[in-house]
Image (cartoon, rainbow, N blue to C red):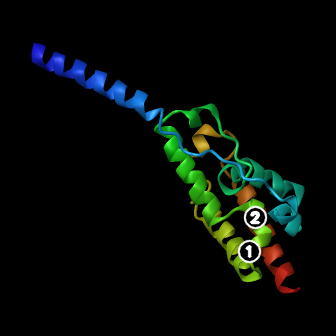
Amino acid sequence: MKIALKMAKWFAIVLVGLLLIAQFVRPARTNPPVDESQTIQARTQMTPEVAAIFDRSCRDCHSNKTVWPWYTNVAPISWFIANHVNEGRHSLNLSEWGRLDRDKQDRKLRQICDEIQDGVMPLSSYTPLHPGSTLSEEDKKTLCAWTDAERQRQSAK
């Protein structure tokens, strides 16, 4: 029994030590400059309702306007979140919408609707810590109606 207790104590000390050392490995938490003329809001006919949904459910991972909460300073959580933001921006960056060609914009608009209807977005790991980010059925209908209308508007150009 004493050996098990001693091993548990050493394991706890090593674990705490590793967590302390991990705090020195910090990922970049960046928000690159935003050219407002290139944003999805500037390049589409977005309603205030759609803009509000994007702001509360998509902005943190899919734009250069990420709000970095306090816990993004704590490793290993910081590594996980920085990685998700980088992947999200790589997949779809609403701040750089104008840099996409028309075909890619069309595919991204379709993808937005598909992923929210399938429940893929927003991520289930995001919503518990961000109250209000979960999309209601009405939000999903609003976004999909907007993406469909925007795709039609762009194809008419």
State if disc 1 and disc 2 touch (CB < 8 Å): yes
Q: In the orientation shown, which residue stands out farthest toward the bottom?
A: 156
Report which residue position mark 2 lands on.
96
What x and y, as percent, mark residue 77? 50, 39
What x and y, as percent, mark residue 63? 71, 55
Up-down relation of residue 136 to residue 154 (above or below)? above
Quadrant for the C terminus in the image = bottom right
Q: In the orientation shown, which residue stands out farthest toward the top?
A: 2
Quarter of the image holding residue 95?
bottom right
Quarter of the image holding residue 21?
top left
Q: Which residue is at the front of the view, 81 or 21?
A: 21
Secondary structure under tag 2 reads helix
Secondary structure under tag 1 reads loop
What x and y, as percent, mark residue 116? 64, 62
Relative to 59, 47 lies left or right: right
For the point 81% across and 51% down, the residue is: 52
What x and y, as percent, mark residue 74? 52, 33
